[in-house]
Image (cartoon, rainbow, N blue to C red):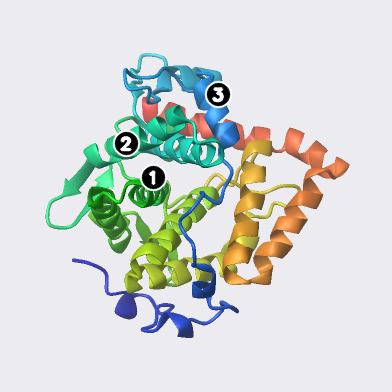
Amino acid sequence: MIFDFIKISCRAVEECAKMPGVKRDFRETAAGLPGVYPIDLSEEIERIDSGTYGPFDEQGLPLVDYEQWYRKNGLPTKGKQFPIAYTPVTIAQFGLGSHQHYTATKEPEDKRRFLASAAWLIGNLKEVPGKFWVWEHHFPMPVYRLTPPWPSAMAQGEGMSLLLRAYEETKQTEFLTSAHRAFQAFLFPLNQGGVTYFDEDGRVWFEEYPSDPPSHVLNGMIFALIGIYEFWSVTADPSACRLFESGILTLQKRLNDFDAGYGSRYDLLTKRVVGEKYHRIHIAQMRLLFDWTGEELFEKMANRWEAVWNNPIARVKRAVLPRLTAYWMLLQVKRMLGI
């Protein structure tokens, strides 16, 4: 059954324009979307092209070697088989980054990679009978104690963003139809196989990892919000409008929990402080949300996180304190793998 957000969430209301907490009508910023994806993915494309994550298939689409990935990150794999697998987020980001480059250069190979990624998303969108459609992940994620298959709000959001751009480029309705199908997963809770979680205060979270207890990954939540916002901008679906503003309200209330004082936190479960890659992503996401909503909290946090990154005392803390979190994560992985 699709959520009735009016009844379930005390934060959801019938008319999007009347949602409390968002100072500017975000719909004013929707003109011209989707266009170029608003988060720069050029460095991610470089990592993919260099083989950092794994090989490419015969169509030139990236796979991820999870055995290699775990070894590189110092996580144990003894006695366990980890696959070389397609990863929906990697495919989506590969396509979005290729689209960014194609928009700038008009290189035919970038267009081919962009549309091949979108075609893969269509072909691998799996129906949960009578409910919705998801991209499944067919590998374990021991840090969050996930066994395959599992869905991801980040994958749904970025997948929608790519499909909308493929539709914009080709006008082929199959891309838009698949984006509609992918959006439906946001209307179902984690315990029904969806990607949305309501916390004890009735706030909406879009979970990159559907873990128990919930992990509340910041970058994944916002990448999901980007997809929802762009889907609304193309379709004017009122459910997308309500979901976006509900998610913004959650971030307004809980964003300070992601501020470690000397950096930004990846999630609220492990509470690990991120390195430069994810810290820069967090800052870019904060600035984007400020542009879209006019909510000053996002601009202030972006400025704070930029300043703290170069603070010498904060640098020392980032060098020492994350080791405790890394040890906790190692214990989680060992527990799941039975090591």
* Figure quadrant of residue 121: top left
Q: In this view, does 281 lie to the left or right of 168?
A: right
Q: In this view, does 237 lie above or below 67?
A: below
Q: Which amino acid does label 3 sit on?
A: Asn
Q: Which of 77 and 285 is in front in this view?
A: 285
**Residue indicated by mark 3:** 73
Q: Do the residues labelled 1 and 2 touch (CB within 8 Å)?
A: yes
Residue at x 61%, y 45% (from the top left corner)? 281
Q: Which of marks 3 and 2 is in front?
A: 2
Q: Are marks 1 and 3 in contact (CB under 8 Å)?
A: no
Which residue is most to the right? Answer: 312
Query: How far apart in space, not on screen, are marks 1 and 3 (Cα)?
Result: 22 Å
Q: Which amino acid does label 1 sit on?
A: Ala
Disc 2 residue crowd, few under 14, some 14–19, many 20+, Cα 10 Å: many
Residue 138 location in percent, x, y?
A: 29, 32
Query: How far apart in space, not on screen, are marks 3 and 2 (Cα)?
Result: 20 Å
**Residue indicated by mark 1:** 155
Residue 143 location in percent, x, y?
A: 46, 35
- Mark 1: secondary structure: helix
Q: In this view, does 196 lie above or below 332?
A: below
Disc 1 residue crowd, few under 14, some 14–19, many 20+, Cα 10 Å: many
**Residue indicated by mark 2:** 137
Query: How far apart in space, not on screen, are marks 1 and 2 (Cα)?
Result: 9 Å
Q: Earlier in the sequence, mark 1 or mark 3?
A: 3
Q: Earlier in the sequence, mark 1 or mark 2?
A: 2
